[in-house]
Amino acid sequence: MKTKIMLTFDSEYTAKPLTYRLIKEYNLVINILKADIGYNNIGHILYEIEGDEAMIKKTLTDLNEPGIHLEMVEAIIAVDRSRCTDCGLCTAVCFPDALAVTGPDWELTYNSDKCTGCDLCLPVCPSKAISKASLL
Ligand code: SF4
Ligand code: SF4
């Protein structure tokens, strides 16, 4: 199973090897897509993880302890269909091809499995139709 998860942690965990724990204790293959520590010392890491489904579910349960929050990420961006004109400009900067305008309707589609959260699509949309759906 391959999915994306968001880890949010308090400052006390900043120097702790959380990613190492995910690999070592849960045997997960980890790809860090984004990481950030805010001015309030709250940290976020967006992972793409691959591993046994039962083990991923166990990780989500085990690591939700005080100071750490782990959740599945269904989508990294959101497209407001009422604003989108299907112009396709955003697809030109989406290198993983998560955004595409294809027939027969030539409507914009978003594939969250392919999205890496690079945010390049946000500023290029002339209709301001794209927003962040996750914390990072
Ligand atoms: S750039 Fe904006 S309006 Fe154009 S297809 Fe993308 S989301 Fe829609
Ligand atoms: S955030 Fe990056 S990868 Fe995701 S849809 Fe936008 S341009 Fe594509």
Image (tube, rainbow, N blue to C red):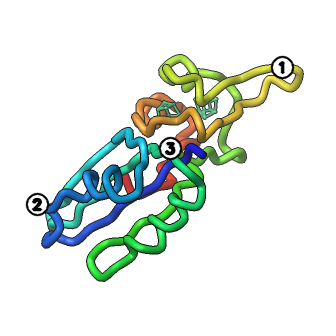
Kind of residue indicated by mark 2: Ala
Image point (51%, 58%), residue name: 56
Image point (71%, 47%), residue name: 82
Label 3 Cα neighbours within 10 Å, binned few <14 / some 14-19 / many ≥20: some
Q: From mark 1 to mark 3, how far is it between C-alphas?
A: 32 Å
Q: From mark 1 to mark 2, how far is it between C-alphas?
A: 49 Å
Give the residue at mark 2: 15
The answer to whether 106 appears left or right of 70 in the picture is right
Q: Position of residue 34 (x, y in %)?
A: 32, 43
In the drawing, what numbered circle is on residue 103?
1
Ligand 1 is within 8 Å of the C-beta of the residue at disc 1: no
Position above or below: 121 against 57: above
Helix, strand, or loop for circle 1?
loop
Q: Position of residue 63 (x, y in %)?
A: 37, 71
Q: Extreme right residue here?
A: 104
Q: Nearer the viewer, residue 79 or 34?
A: 34
Image point (56%, 43%), residue name: 2
The answer to whether the residue labelled 2 contacts the one labelled 3, judged by CB atoms less than 8 Å apart, is no
Q: Nearer the viewer, mark 2 or mark 3?
A: 3
Kind of residue indicated by mark 3: Glu
Label 2 Cα neighbours within 10 Å, binned few <14 / some 14-19 / many ≥20: few
Q: Would you identify the image quadrant in which residue 86 lies?
A: top right
Position above or below: 18 against 30: below
The answer to whether the residue labelled 1 contacts the one labelled 3, judged by CB atoms less than 8 Å apart, is no
Q: From mark 2 to mark 3, how far is it between C-alphas?
A: 24 Å
Precedes in sequence: disc 2 or disc 3 = 2
Helix, strand, or loop for circle 2?
loop
Q: Position of residue 113 (x, y in %)?
A: 59, 38
Q: Would you identify the image quadrant in which residue 40 lies?
A: bottom left
Give the residue at mark 3: 50
Q: Nearer the viewer, residue 129 or 46?
A: 46
Kind of residue indicated by mark 1: Gly
